Image (cartoon, rainbow, N blue to C red):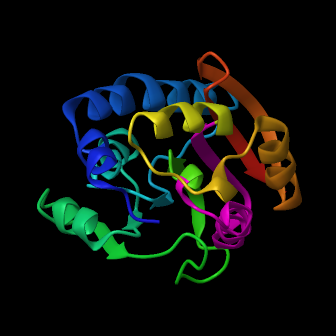
Amino acid sequence: MKLNKIEFLVMNSPIRRFFQKNIDFKIFKKYLKKYNIDLTGKVILDAGCGSGYSSKIILEEFKPSKLYAFDFMPEQIKLAKKLNLREVNFFVGDITKIPLPPSTFDGVFVIGVLHHVPEWKRSLYEVSRVLKKGGVLLIEELSGSFVNFFNRLGFTHPKEARFEWSDFVNGMEKAGFKILEERKIFFEGIKSFICIKL
């Protein structure tokens, strides 16, 4: 699903970049350290990369041997390519049908994407498909009730993607993931997860 003008501006704002660098990725790094998982030099996917800032952080923090990054919106990929991150293979793509071979990646990052996707459960299966067995999924998401709050502020999110946490966890497990840990970022509204593909 495409972002409306309000959300496009918010997702590409300095505030969002600050939160990604100083909250999302700090939590992700703590998870990885705690579970003794090293993504340095690995093959990584940034699914729903937006304007490429998360990909830039992944490059700096993990120095992957290969980094693929896609977004559903061509406008976002155009912005991402302006970052001149030559090490990143940016492309327009759909998380419900990722155009990459099975068992390609050691790690996948999905940051604030699935609450935009009506077929979010199918997206989890696709992420599982492209991850290697034992690969790690690092994910940050918003609950359905929190999304409802944002919709009152002018955001637009599909009803089918307004999941509550019990449904989300069930979807992750059905897609073949074991959740190692979850953490509240903003009360019950935003959470991050570290998962392993079984």
- Magenta span contains residue 51: no
Q: Is residue 149 left or right of residue 162?
A: left
Q: Position of residue 9 (x, y in %)?
A: 23, 45
How many numbered marks appear?
A: 0
Q: Residue at x 37, y 33 (%)?
A: 20
Q: Is residue 117 magenta?
A: yes
Q: Report the front residue among 28 and 23.
A: 23
Measured as percent of width and height from the top left, residue 169 is found at: 82, 43
Q: Nearer the viewer, residue 11 or 153?
A: 153
The quarter of the displayed image where residue 103 is located: bottom right
Query: How far from the left and from the top, in percent, is residue 75?
Result: 23, 67
> Image height check: is 97 above or below 58?
below
Res. 133 image quadrant = bottom right
Q: In which quadrant is the C terminus drawn?
A: bottom right
What residue range appears in magenta?
116-142
Relative image position of residue 183 (x, y in whole percent)? 67, 23
Work out whether 100 lies above or below 158. below
Residue found 28% across the figure and 45% down from its top: 6
Given residues 130 and 11, the one toward you in this image is 11
Is 5 situated above or below 104?
A: above
Q: Is residue 113 left or right of residue 18?
A: right
Image point 39% across, 63% down: which residue? Answer: 67
- Using the image, determine if residue 159 lies above or below residue 101: above
